[in-house]
Image (cartoon, rainbow, N blue to C red):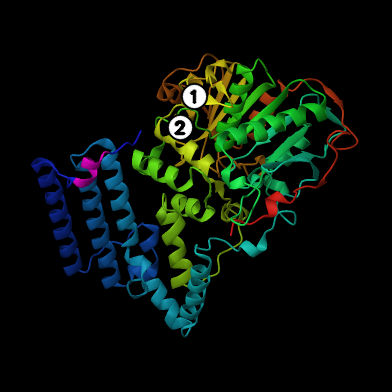
Amino acid sequence: MGNADSSQRSVPPHVSSDRLAAIQTDFLQSWQALLDQARQGALAPLKDRRFSSEAWSNNPHSLFSAHAYLIVARALQDLAQAADLGDAARERLQFSVMQWVEAAAPSNYLASNPDAMQALLRSGGDTLQRGLANLLHDLRRRRITQTDESAFAPGDNLAVTPGAVVYENPLMQLIQYKPQCAQVHQRPLLMVPPCINKYYILDLQPANSLVAHALQAGFQVFMISWRNPRPEDADGIDGKTWDDYIQDGVLQAIDVAQAISRQPRINALGFCVGGTLLSTALAVARARGQDPVAALTLLTTFLDFRDTGILDVFVDEWHARTREQQLGDGGLMTAGELSTTFSFLRPAELVWNYVGSNYLMGEAPRAFDLLAWNADGTNLPGPFFAWYFRNTYLENRLKTGQLHVCGQAVDLRALDMPAYLYASRDDHIVPWKSAYASTLLLRGPLRFVLGESGHIAGVINPPERGRRGYWFRSAGELPSDPSEWEASSTHATGSWWPDWLAWLTDHSGPMRRAARSLGNQRYPVIEPAPGRYVKVKAD
């Protein structure tokens, strides 16, 4: 699980003589071939998107530097991969080399980027002026602008599905959405989004809102909107723990949804960390002799944290102790730090891509709802984060049955309700095989679906735009080996949403007349959706 002792961090990496000789030979041969091509004026254009324009292809000096950069980058990456270190230390070395390699690309600097130099000359210096203005703007707010955030706002053109807040406490608001069909399924659906982000990833614009699609299919929908703690808050939210989020967050939301819908059992969906919270809460409920959820949906969710992918480079005892000392008794894990961490997991796409377009080319980022949501980050209570980091990412205790939450031993194997498990093939935050590992913990009838694309884009894939497909297995027990599942799966084109809605229909009871009003006497309407909590900015 990524533990690295001090000796691994202090001993210089070593590469076997045979492997080192092979890397050196490959480097020298590639370098000599590059020199020969340059002398002959026969440098080949590059397909790498950073160097593929005519400005690069038509400039021999720039094209040579791009070729040279790629040769050196490959050699460095080969050396890091060949280092004779423990797995954890090698992963850290590879991650560090990747950061340096991406930062050193000649496309990232004005003097070595022919596209930027051409734009500068053609604009008479305007691109430089605009780029510097963009840079100063981002320095003031301490993060890179990835989209035109002014084009979007929750309640205006995002999170606009009609509904109302019917309950709130210091941790969350609960939204009940207005039914969009005269007849609705008897059993409602509660959505538990990640508390590391705003809930409206599941309710973006009407065309790509999972909430809206569920309502149009005849489901009653409730949504948790987590509060975004701020440094100036004086009510102690910065001291809230994982237990608080389970008891006063998920379990409280389940109670309210049951009371309003007058259903003893509801259905529930958890996304990412929301899925981890939801599964933990249901295990706590089972330990108390309660069974409040009839069918469970988990989207890109960790239950078994054995393989956390590239995030593993941040996971060790030193980091856990540091966070516990900093935040264990209170304080906030800031949205800015979380955002920076996730951006540098994919620096080429989420950092240097915008350095080139925003600062070198002086371009204004285009408006994109997914990126606007991504920029609208949330802070986390320090004790919550410190507990979560140690007990899941570092020690992987959630799956053991020995971890205590809210005074109860958490046994995920007690969860035997039907479950729909979705993962994304290119997910760098929750690797799909790690999401598949949940099939070895949950005991009910399971359906596992693997979508195309990444952590967010794979999930937000409405049928009307369903260019991305998904894999499924039509029948039979799921094998323990995800590779075996993959080999026997069937690929379908388009969105996975209709597949999920059809599955959910089978677990939602008969149709009945939709309620005319939201809330009830005990839980009256507090304010219209999307509510106050979602509008609080982290910075």
* Amino acid on which the number 1 mark rests in the picture: Leu
Kindly tell me whether residue 197 is visible in this rendering: no
Task: Give the image location of residue 336, x and y in percent.
Answer: 51, 56
| Residue at 29% from the left image edge and 67% from the top image edge | 63
* Amino acid on which the number 2 mark rests in the picture: Asn
Q: Which residue is mark 2?
A: 391
Task: Give the image location of residue 20, x and y in percent.
Answer: 12, 46
Q: Within 10 angstroms of label 2, few (less than 14), some, or many (20 or more) residues?
A: some
Determine the CA span between mark 2 and mark 1: 8 Å
Do the residues bearing badges 2 and 1 touch, measured as CB atoms within 8 Å? Answer: yes
Q: Is residue 131 magenta?
A: no
Give the extent of the magenta segment.
5-10
Q: Is residue 243 left or right of residue 26?
A: right
Q: Which residue is mark 1?
A: 403
N-terminal-most mark, 2 or 1: 2
| Residue at 51% from the left image edge and 68% from the top image edge | 138
Q: Is residue 121 left or right of residue 32?
A: right
Task: Give the image location of residue 251, x and y in percent.
Answer: 67, 29
- Residue nearest the viewer, comparing 316 with 104: 316
Task: Decide whether the magenta segment is chiefly helix, strand or loop.
Answer: helix
